[in-house]
Amino acid sequence: YWGQSSGYFTNNKYQNSLLSYCQTGHWDIIHLAFLATFSSTSPTTGFILDLDKNTYGVWDSTGGKAVDPAVVKSFLQVGQDIQACQKLGVKIGLSLGGALASIEIKAGSGPALGKWLHDTFFGGNGAVRPFGAGVVLDGLDYDDETSVPPVADIIAINQFLKANNPKVFITAAPQCPFPDYNIGGVLAAANNGFDFVQVQFYNNGQCNLNNPLFNFDQWVEMLGIPIYVGVPGATQSANGGSYSTPAQVQSALQLITSEVLKPWLFGVMTWDVSSAEATSKTTTTTTTTTSAKPSTSTTTKTTTTTTTTTKAATTTT
């Protein structure tokens, strides 16, 4: 994830540009965080896309208000970074929600919201495109931690996006207690359109990665789709005791890959890229990445990020 400057609490520095993180070679997917405020009426009443008021700004068009021209210019620069990242092979997703989100999806509004997201951020041609007319994102992430959306409407959004953007990926970032309170109902539904999940194995007590009841196996058993193991990028990016050291992450992933769970391990997710890179300035780990699909080849790379760990298919933030 990028957009909330979580690293500030690690090194007192705000996040760097999106492109600078893509250029490190550490990340396969980066989610823009967050489309924090939207509703079923957003196509006409506006939305809030928050990429940190201290760096790239907050796009606020709620109530039909005009967006600050400085923010418009800043977001167009982010759009250029998005395209440059994509040329480097880094996929860029849009994350909906966050811990302070204000999301209201009314029953029956899914198809219209899917079209609005398509026209605003994906392959459509809407009048309002914050990152620029030619900028097409690669995926959508649900990190709604404040509401329980109607199952049928989330599925309708996913179906619309996939029908009109054949290569789009759709994921979610549920909390590790199963089932997740906010998005669990959708994840349990058949044909829900999700390609993988990024489970937050932190901030949740016993199911945290560094606790005995780390429940990766339960998520595999109940969902049967690929899973990214979510960890905080730094001690300061999680609640007390939730941070897992590089050694703890390595150990957990080695255990997973030694069992029948291996095919379901898709990679490692971190919150967030700025904190992970800040931590990596003082800690270096040598890591091996292996595809979650046994039939594919293995590649090895040396990185400096503490959360790119052994035998993870990809790294996402």
Image (cartoon, rainbow, N blue to C red):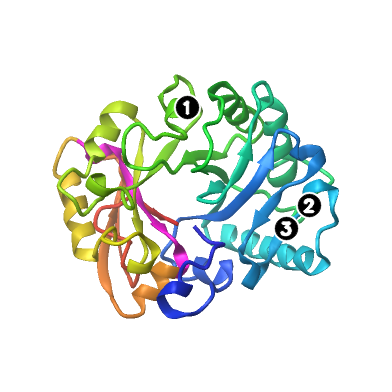
Q: Is residue 170 left or right of residue 315?
A: right
Q: Secondary structure at mark 3?
A: strand
- Quote the CA–CA distance across marks 3 and 2: 6 Å
Tell me what residue is drawn at x 71 percent, y 63 percent.
75
Q: Is residue 160 visible?
A: yes
Compared to 285, does 200 lie above or below?
A: above
Kindly identify which residue carries mark 1: 186
Using the rendered image of the protein, determine whether residue 131 is visible from the camera's viewpoint: no
Q: In the rendered view, tell whether residue 271 sits above or below residue 46.
A: below
Residues at marks 3 and 2 touching, judged by CB atoms closer than 8 Å: yes
Image quadrant assignment for residue 216: top left
Is disc 1 placed on a helix, strand or loop?
A: helix
Residue type indicated by callout 3: Trp
Circle 3 residue: 59
Given contact means CB atoms under 8 Å apart, are the residues at marks 1 and 2 in contact?
no
Disc with the residue nearer the chain's start (3 vs 1) = 3
Q: Is residue 268 magenta?
A: yes
Highlighted magenta segment, given as a residue range: 261-274
Amino acid beneath label 1: Val
Residue 293 location, quadrant: top left
Give how far across and how far down residue 99 sits, in percent.
50, 50
